[in-house]
Amino acid sequence: MKSVVVLFAIFGFAFASPAKLRPETIPEENSSFGTKYLIYRDEAGKFHFEDLTRDVPTPRTTIDDVTIYFYTRKNQDKPEVFKTGDLSGLLNSRVYDSKKPSYFIIHGLNNNFESAMFQVLRPAILDKIDVNVFVVDWSPIANKNYLTAKGAVPQIGKFVGDFINRMMDYFKLPTTMFRIIGHSLGAHVSGVAGAEVTGLADYIIGLDPAGPLFTVANKDNRLDASDADHVHIIHTSTSTLGFSPPIGDVDIYPNGGSSQPGCGLDLIGTCAHSRAYYYLAESIHSGGFGTVNCHNYKAFRNGECDHNHSSKLGSLDVDRSASGVYYLDTNSDYPFSLS
């Protein structure tokens, strides 16, 4: 607890209290783009501090930096493991079925194939539908630091997109068989992968895409609406770690998008950032959380948009009829859905 207090005392100028972070309107430019310093906590609980005024490197990345852990209902506890640069691992698979849709799930900073997002999303998907699940692990790069990981996003995304292209070519598969889900920096990797795919992947779900050093203007290194047939984005920490403006076909802002109930004094946004994949996992089981199209969160809370178009957050059957910005409120703990 002392370390948190000290960090806030030193760097508190960079953060407002969660209660003040909910914008009445969504900014046109990403509010965390100009962040000079980044404080984040890894899964072991260790705090990291980075100076984001330094140049973003272009790290040397190879196909050996990206490992795929492949799961189906037949091998939920024992994945097949192979590299993105070699299709032979998949060709020799005992469980791959090219007739079933394929889901690629991609982690963000300081994560790996055993991270929490995979522990909740992978079983949720396989419990719901009988599909192929490819967990993309790029931890050799993602575990270095934010600047290095951010600089590697384009190349990692190209590796994944190229792997999908080779799957389509060899098995004669349509792009509609591929869905991509990414969290944080992994959401932007998903976008680059989708852009690399020949044609349009069926959909991408971006889970609180990373905000620091990403801009609205530069679409080449981040997720945007053109990267798949449908891009569905869930924003949960827009004032700290996440990207604030809408960049998908549908952008959903639970509880206003900047902080999340039940996260307490979440000064650096770690809890709110992770809520995106917990919301998605629950929505897969339930069929989606109800949302309402609205021009801002205050108007939504005041009931001014109650008669507007309603849609749903998440599920695996994303609502393609929806377009624009949507809001909802959640509970502070599981079950998060109010309905």
Image (cartoon, helix red, strand yellow):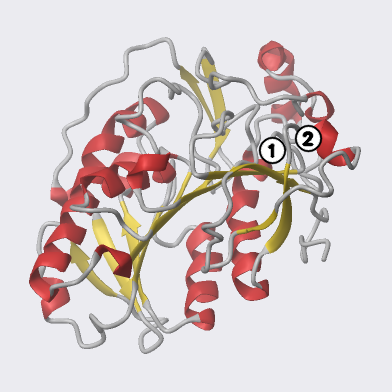
What kind of residue is marked 1? Gly
Task: Name the residue: 35% across, 81% down.
Answer: 78
Q: Which mark is residue 60?
A: none
Q: Relative to 74, is 1 on the left or the right?
A: right
Query: According to the image, label 2 marks what residue?
Result: 297
Discs 1, 2 touching: Cβ within 8 Å? yes
- Please determine whether, in this image, residue 102 is positioned above or below residue 289: below
Q: Relative to 58, is 271 on the left or the right?
A: right
Total marks drawn?
2
Task: Name the residue: 18% across, 52% down.
Answer: 198
Hey, which quadrant is residue 2 in on the image?
top right
The secondary element bearing badge 2 is classed as: helix
Rendered location of residue 282, percent (x, y): 65, 67
Is residue 188 something that shows in the picture?
no
User: As rendered, which of 110 and 221 lies closer to the eye?
Assistant: 221
Hey, which quadrant is residue 324 in on the image?
top right
- Please determine whether, in this image, residue 71 is positioned above or below residue 288: below
Query: According to the image, label 1 marks what residue?
Result: 257
The secondary element bearing badge 1 is classed as: loop
Is residue 257 something that shows in the picture?
yes
Rendered location of residue 321, percent (x, y): 56, 56
State the quadrant of the N terminus. top right
Rendered location of residue 92, percent (x, y): 12, 81
* C-alpha separation, residue under disc 1 versus residue under disc 2: 9 Å
- Please determine whether, in this image, residue 39 is positioned above or below residue 101: above
Task: Name the residue: 58% across, 52% down.
Answer: 322
Instruction: Classify mark 1: residues with Cα within 10 Å, few (<14), some (14-19) or many (20+).
Output: many
| Residue most extreme to the right | 302
- Please determine whether, in this image, residue 66 is positioned above or below residue 114: above
User: As rendered, which of 176 and 85 lies closer to the eye?
Assistant: 176
Rendered location of residue 195, percent (x, y): 26, 44
